[in-house]
Amino acid sequence: MAKFSVLSTFAAAAITLQLLLVPASASPHMKYIDAICDRSHDQDYCNPLAEAVMALTIAHAEKTAAFVAETGKTDPTFTEYHKAYLTVVADLKSANVKLKESPDTAHYDVRSSTDQMKRVEGLVASKNDQASTTLKEMTVQMEKLLDLAASAADAVDDDDENIHRRV
């Protein structure tokens, strides 16, 4: 039985990765995450899926923060980007801890990271060097992952107060 649960989690994570290829819009991933969770008829099934999404999102934020820190050694303007990504990493780690006990708070923590990404976008928008171009691409990916993580946190929440996000 445990083997089936692990395989299901990996299958769900694989589906999640495929969902990242869907163009961004207002929570396009919510319907897919809800469909996965609804088919299980077990809200606990959503927790490992949400945790996998959160882990993937944290890993990307940490990878980008490391890239920005390294680039900041030769380009001091990257210091602001680094601060933003460190804030995102902290918010996501906080969300991950709160996921089971307070999914609404986890959702809020993830969504607050979106503000940091908008800040980075604004700061780097006019730059065209290779490092800035790479950062722009990483930030677009980060925004997709944040949307997916927010949707996953919302799916774990078993109340209907956020139903407007699912329609």
Image: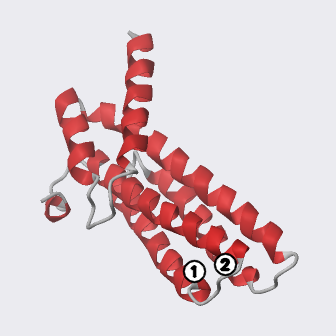
Q: Earlier in the sequence, mark 1 or mark 2?
A: 2
Instruction: Name the side, left or right, on which 4 lies relative to 163.
Output: right
From the image, tell me which residue sits under label 2: 81
Three-letter amino acid code at the position of disc 1: Val
Residue at the spot x=67%, y=76% of the render?
Answer: 132
Q: Which mark identifies residue 133?
A: none
Residue at the spot x=39%, y=37% of the render?
Answer: 49
Q: Are marks 1 and 2 in contact (CB under 8 Å)?
A: yes
Q: Residues within 10 Å of mark 2 (few under 14, many from 20)?
A: many
- Percent x, y of residue 24: 33, 64
Judging depth in this view, the residue of 108 and 136 nearest the camera is: 136
Q: Quadrant of residue 93?
A: bottom right
- Percent x, y of residue 112: 45, 73
Q: Is residue 23 above or below residue 77?
A: above
Judging depth in this view, the residue of 149 and 138 nearest the camera is: 138
From the image, tell me which residue sits under label 1: 120
| SS assignment at label 2 | helix
Residue at the spot x=37%, y=32% of the render?
Answer: 12
Residue at the spot x=74%, y=80% of the render?
Answer: 78
Q: Is residue 14 above or below residue 148?
A: above
Three-letter amino acid code at the position of disc 2: Tyr
Q: Quadrant of residue 44?
A: top left
Instruction: Name the side, left or right, on which 15 lies relative to 116.
Output: left
| SS assignment at label 1 | helix
> Can residue 47 be seen in the rendering of this structure?
yes
Instruction: Report how far apart the C-alphas of labels 1 and 2 lie in the structure.
Output: 6 Å
Q: Is residue 75 above or below residue 19?
A: below
